[in-house]
Amino acid sequence: MSTFILAFSLFLAVILIMAVGYIFQNKRISGSCGGLDALGIEKACDCEKPCAKKRARLRNERRLNVQIIED
């Protein structure tokens, strides 16, 4: 039982350290190759039109004539 508690504590400590590091770096989580963003692909699905949330955002951008750069 003590081995389990030691291993659990170790994993918990590592996860906590990684979380603190992520918070302070303030970067997006991405894969080792950069994911679809590195290829210039905007969306991963084969949908003919974007979802309602994205359509609303695009409408607002056009209405305000503002270009928003996503992180």
Image (tube, rainbow, N blue to C red):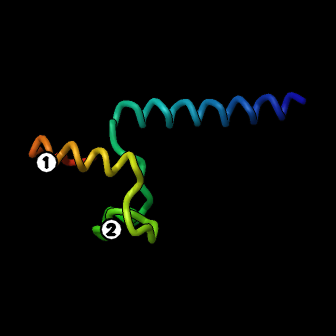
On screen, residue 53 versus residue 16, left or right, reads left
List x then y, in percent, for residue 29.
42, 48
Q: Are marks 1 and 2 in contact (CB under 8 Å)?
A: no
* Cα distance between the residues tagged 1 and 2: 18 Å
On screen, residue 18 versus residue 29, left or right, reads right
Kind of residue at disc 2: Ile
For disc 2, the neighbor class at 10 Å (few under 14, some 14 to 19, many from 20) is few
List x then y, in percent, for residue 64.
12, 41
Residue, x 40% and y 49% (percent of image)? 52
Towards the viewer: 66 or 62: 62
The circle drawn on residue 67 is: 1
Residue at the far right in the pictured view? 1
List x then y, in percent, for residue 61.
18, 45
Towards the viewer: 66 or 18: 66
Kind of residue at disc 1: Gln
Q: Secondary structure at mark 1?
A: loop
Towards the viewer: 66 or 37: 66
The N terminus lies in quadrant: top right
Residue, x 61% and y 30% (percent of image)? 13
The circle drawn on residue 41 is: 2
> If you read the primary sequence from the N terminus, does the residue marked by circle 1 or circle 2 appear first?
2
For disc 1, the neighbor class at 10 Å (few under 14, some 14 to 19, many from 20) is few
Q: Is residue 23 above or below residue 40?
A: above
Residue, x 86% and y 28% (percent of image)? 2
